[in-house]
């Protein structure tokens, strides 16, 4: 009986270690983000800029609802992602920050602008809009798969 209990404890501990490593969000790509924006009618092709620079992709556009969205996909370049994301956070002023595993959420808000910045692995998403649009901005980030 003691051996059985010991084996059971070892199995449970192993499963906990394998499954309990924090949140694991999956990254997305620029085309998926553009598709979601088009589905909502937010995407205006005349105000967009999609660039590929040295293996990274960047979507930078104004939306039809007067928000701004920036999505970076750094592929395997975590150093460049660290640098760009931290500069984005610094430019936001006073922020609240939450990090869990491969996932980091930073929010900044003043009287006029709400900014949601989310990093998953080597990608990050920034959505900026009016302070009154906070709930809608979070819902869009949730649909993209970057906010829970």
Image (tube, rainbow, N blue to C red):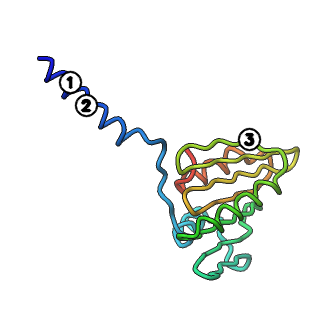
Q: Nearer the viewer, residue 71 or 33?
A: 71
Residue occupied by mark 1: 6
Q: Is residue 116 left or right of residue 34?
A: right
For label 2, the residue is: 10
100 vs 5, left or right, is right
Q: Residue 140, position in %: x, y? A: 61, 54
Number of marks: 3
Q: CA distance from mark 3 to mark 2?
A: 39 Å
Confirm or deny contact between disc 2 and disc 1 (CB under 8 A): yes
Q: Residue at x 44, y 42 (%)?
A: 21
In which quadrant of the rendered image does the C terminus lie?
Answer: top right
Residue 91, above or below 101:
below
Residue 88: which disc? none
Q: How busy is the neighbourhood of tag 2: few (under 14 within 10 Å), some, or many (20 plus)?
A: few
Residue in the picture at 25% in, 26% down: 9
- Of residues 105 and 70, the one drawn nearer to the viewer in this rendering: 105
Q: Secondary structure at mark 2?
A: helix
> Where 110 falls versus 59 (above or below)?
above
At 51% across and 64% down in the image, what residue appears? 28
First reached walking from the N terminus: tag 1 or tag 3: 1
Q: Nearer the viewer, mark 3 or mark 2?
A: 2
Residue 96: mark: 3
**Quadrant into which the N terminus falls:** top left
Dot 1 and dot 3 residues touching (CB under 8 Å): no
Q: Residue at x 84, y 49 (%)?
A: 93
Q: Secondary structure at mark 3?
A: strand
> Badge 3 local density, few (<14 within 10 Å), some, or many (20+)?
few
Percent from the top left, x then y, of residue 85? 70, 60
Work out how far the residue at label 2 is from the one at label 1, CA to CA, in angstroms.
6 Å
Residue 76 on image: x %, y % = 53, 70
Label 1 residue SS? helix
């Amino acid at each position: 009986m003691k051996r059985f209990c010991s084996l059971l404890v070892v199995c449970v501990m192993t499963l906990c270690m394998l499954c309990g490593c924090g949140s694991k969000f999956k990254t997305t790509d620029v085309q998926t983000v553009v598709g979601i924006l088009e589905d909502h009618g937010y995407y205006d092709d005349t105000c967009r800029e999609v660039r590929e620079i040295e293996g990274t992709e960047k979507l930078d556009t104004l939306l039809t609802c007067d928000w701004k969205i920036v999505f970076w996909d750094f592929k395997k370049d975590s150093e460049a992602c660290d640098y760009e994301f931290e500069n984005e956070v610094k430019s936001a002023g006073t922020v609240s920050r939450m990090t869990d595993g491969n996932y980091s959420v930073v929010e900044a808000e003043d009287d006029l602008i709400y900014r949601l910045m989310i990093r998953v692995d080597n990608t990050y998403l920034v959505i900026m809009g009016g302070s009154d649009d906070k709930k809608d901005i979070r819902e869009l980030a949730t649909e993209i798969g970057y906010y829970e």
